[in-house]
Image (spheres, rainbow, N blue to C red):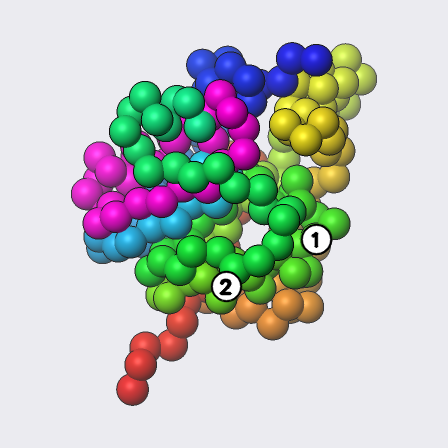
Amino acid sequence: MLTIYQIPALYRLLMRLGYGPDYAARYALVADRIGDPDDVLEVCCGHLGLYRHLARRGLVRSYVGLEQAPAMLRLARRGGVAVRAHDVRAGGALPAAGTVIMQASLYQFHDIADTLLPRLWVAARRRLVIAEPVRNLSQSRSRVVRWAARALTRTPDGRIHTFRYTEATLLELYRRCDVPVSRVDRTPGGREIVISSLRAPSP
């Protein structure tokens, strides 16, 4: 069955349509939280939209992306971007980086989030930034729109992800995992929230 992860151009188009005016704002919020050039690890980097935004703003000193979808990996190789094939569900330590980012993907791992979020935090030498949708088309009142959104976003492992976080349930996850919440930002339309966790500076 077709999914948006098989066709990067379709993925980009539907993300733009789904987020509307929030599409650009969600990248800008993440970039604002980084502030200065840093070594970046992006988990589930997709079509590299965030990477391109950060690079344009001069915030990428070095970059490693982790991704599972073959089409996204081919896209990265064609563009000469350092993206590694990686199955988040396989467990194990993640590559360390000054800034670790996961955008619009944590809901796909909600069943292992209590172990995944600490792994992301351990990998972050300076900051962890999680951007997560809290409103999207899979929650539409229209049965047809809900079906289409959920079917199209079937991930490469064959899963259809109907679960979505709310701001409250996401913050509760951080509390359970004992990962600090330094700042919470919201896109203007409220479709995505960005949670930043900062490590205390070394004495």
Which quadrant of the view contains residue 113?
Answer: bottom right
Q: Amino acid at mark 2?
A: Trp
Q: Which residue position holds label 1?
A: 112
Q: Is residue 62 left or right of residue 166?
A: left
Q: Which residue position holds label 2?
A: 121
Q: Amino acid at mark 1?
A: Ile
Mark with earlier residue (1, 2): 1
- Does the magenta segment cover residue 65? yes
Q: Name the secondary structure under disc 1.
A: helix
- Rate crowding at label 2 as few (under 14), some (14 to 19) or many (20 or more) other CA atoms within 10 Å: many
Q: Which residues are magenta?
A: 46-72
Q: Name the secondary structure under disc 2.
A: helix
Query: Where residue 9 is drawn, which disc sits there?
Result: none
Q: Is residue 51 left or right of residue 182?
A: left
Q: Is residue 140 left or right of residue 118?
A: right
Q: Position of residue 157 (x, y in %)?
A: 68, 31
Q: Position of residue 59 (x, y in %)?
A: 24, 47
Q: Quick check: can you spot residue 14?
A: no
**Along the line of sight, the residue nearer the viewer: 126 or 17:** 126
Residue sitting farthest toward the left? 58
Residue at figure coordinates x 70%, y 40% from the top left: 164
Which quadrant of the view contains residue 152?
Answer: top right
Residue at figure coordinates x 74%, y 39% from the top left: 163
